[in-house]
Image (tube, helix red, strand yellow):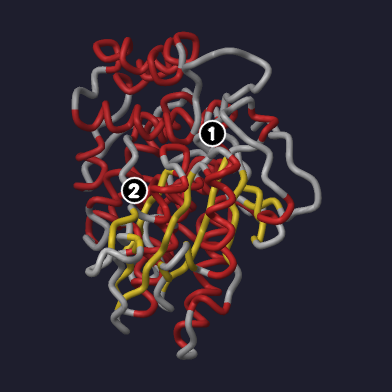
Amino acid sequence: MEQIETLANMPVMSVNEFVDLLAGSYIRVIENGLSPKVLPSVMLWGAPGVGKSQGVRQIAREIEIATGKKVNVTDVRLLLFNPIDLRGIPVANDDKTLAVWLKPKIFQMDESDDVVNILFLDEISAAPQSVQAAAYQITLDRVVGEHKLPDNCIVIAAGNRITDKSVSVKMPKALANRLLHIEVNGSFESWKKWAIGAGINRKVLGYLSFRRDRLFGFDATRDDLAFPTPRSWEMVSNILNTVSEDVEKVCPLISGLIGVGYATEFKFWCRSFGEMPDIDKIFDGRETEVPKDPDVLYAVVSSMTTYASEHKYDAVAIGNSLSYAKRLPADFGELLIQNYSDIAKNYVSFLRTVPEYAEFSMNRATLRNGNVQ
């Protein structure tokens, strides 16, 4: 995958890396009975569509699973706000002697002990400096004017870099110094782990496993309006899952998301799906041929992964698929097992209860050691 230009003097992480780091930090603080406000507000930097917003939603899910608390995410697109929107509307008090500020809806948060709030200030770098200035108090003092964030609120901001040629205003140093900065970089492995659990369409997963460099095609030096990013591939997946899996039929829609060139290449690659063995037969344990063409093998592995994720605890079906996997070329067998391990957290523990998994592992160990009879 093409390297994306990075910012200086801050850590660079994939989506999974920053999710694991931040979610783990918040979980430890919460489990120790402390308020999330003891941790600094976070600023996520990255190119358009790299997965910043998706990562914040993942953090919310991780906190819910680990703590048992309900996590509410308030998504505020600061580009659409002005300072008054954040502070509230001035109205007269009861005796008409003073002005008071009506609380904006974003501050109407549940303060219960069994709730965690995440205030996500998206597109902060695209907001006018007057709005960024209003964010000073939110990020450091956790207040705007008369309104205060509850103690159970986490503040995370995100924005694009000036080098991305997106709408971006240079962040004042005073605001920057109030934030913990992380640059989010594109990573296929990180995206794939998320995609398997999120139900991304098997054709998208298979194609991008074959052409990892196509996951992120953003180029700040070009004026293209449609280009591939993790976000646009998710939208392609949604079209295939909800409109039609016939890529030829929906190719104009796909072209509008990732560009004509990329969509045409994706369309031609997807024709390999017509040459695949019957996936139902594989999981039913019926004899099927193993294709030889690499394009088709990638399609088989992605389709088997999708099927397995939908029947993840059917030990018989998973066992049948592993018996078939023993006949795949070694690198595709390893890829399938890696995909299976990403189906769910600790899914490998379930795989170890399936007899065919031990047989598969022993077979692969023999092949790696060069002891093929």
| Image quadrant assignment for residue 303 | top left
Marker count (numbered): 2
Residue positioned 49% across, 25% down in the render: 228
**On-image quarter of the N terminus:** top right
**Residue 330 showing in the rendered view:** yes
User: Viewer-proximal residue, 85 or 111?
Assistant: 85
Q: Which mark is residue 48?
A: 1
Tag of residue 292: none
Whether residue 365 is visible to the viewer of this picture, yes or no, is no
Task: Tell me if label 2 and label 1 are in contact, CB under 8 Å.
Answer: no
Residue 205 lies, in percent from the top left, at: 41, 35
Give the amino acid type for the residue marked by disc 2 in the picture.
Ala
Of residue 152 and residue 368, the one placed in the foreground of this image is 152
The residue lying toward the viewer, choosing from 237 and 164, is 164
Which residue has dot 2 on it? 198
Q: Residue 6: where, in percent of width, then height?
A: 73, 40
Question: Which quadrant would residue 274 be assigned to in this image?
Answer: top left
Secondary structure of the residue carrying numbered label 2: helix
Q: The residue under label 1 is which amino acid type?
A: Pro
Q: Quadrant of residue 168?
A: top right
| Residue 171 left/right relative to 60 | right
Within-10-Å neighbours for mark 1: few <14, some 14–19, many 20+:
some
Mark whose residue sits in front, 2 or 1: 1
Q: Residue at x 22, y 54 (%)?
A: 311
Q: CA distance from mark 2 to mark 1?
A: 20 Å
Q: Left of 102 or right of it: where is 357?
A: right
Rendering coords of residue 101 (x, y %): 35, 61
